[in-house]
Image (spheres, rainbow, N blue to C red):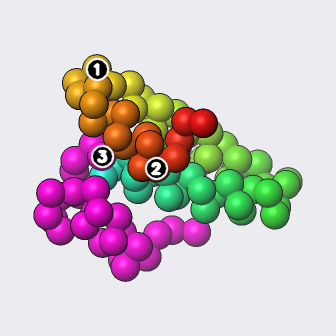
Amino acid sequence: MALDKQEVSGIVNKFGKNEKDTGAVNVQIALLTERINQLTEHCKQFKKDKSSQRGLLILVGQRRRMLKYIQRKNLEGYRALIKELGLRK
């Protein structure tokens, strides 16, 4: 269920300034989005796994708070990020 090192490094390279830029908000949101997508697929397969559903809701809340932060600080960056991640329809 967790992301492996290759997936993490690919996301960090894509959304960060360099390969060690794991603390940037864009990178954190992208990593959370990937984990949310994986957990969503898991919860579709195992409908009675309530602990994973709770963890999914916690991750969605964290991502929502980070998105609110980046929306306040950098509106253009926020719009580009949600477009690239495909979050809003």
Dot 3 or dot 1: first in sequence order is: 3
Q: Which of 43 and 85 lies nearest the eye of the viewer?
A: 85
Q: Quadrant of residue 18?
A: bottom left
Give the x, y percent position of residue 73.
Answer: 22, 24
Residue linked to disc 1: 72
Q: Residue at x 70, y 47 (%)?
A: 53
Q: CA distance from mark 3 to mark 2?
A: 10 Å
Q: Residue at x 22, y 47 (%)?
A: 24
Q: Residues within 10 Å of mark 1 (few under 14, many from 20)?
A: few
Residue 54 on the magenta span: no
Q: Residue 85 shows which numbered tag?
A: 2
Residue linked to disc 3: 26
Residue 23 on the magenta span: yes
Tag count: 3
Q: Which of 82 and 9 lies nearest the eye of the viewer?
A: 82
Dot 3 or dot 2: first in sequence order is: 3
Q: Residue furthest top?
A: 72
Answer yes or no: is residue 70 visible. no
The region drawn magenta spans: 1-26
Element assignment for label 3: helix
Give the x, y percent position of residue 28.
Answer: 34, 49
Q: Quadrant of residue 67?
A: top left
Tell me the kind of residue under disc 3: Asn
In this view, 54 is above or below 21: above
Dot 1 or dot 2: first in sequence order is: 1
Tell me the kind of residue under disc 2: Leu
Q: Nearer the viewer, mark 3 or mark 2?
A: 2
Give the x, y percent position of residue 14.
Answer: 29, 63
State left or right for residue 15 relative to residue 46: left
Element assignment for label 1: helix
Give the x, y percent position of residue 77.
Answer: 27, 36
In this view, 35 is above or below 62: below
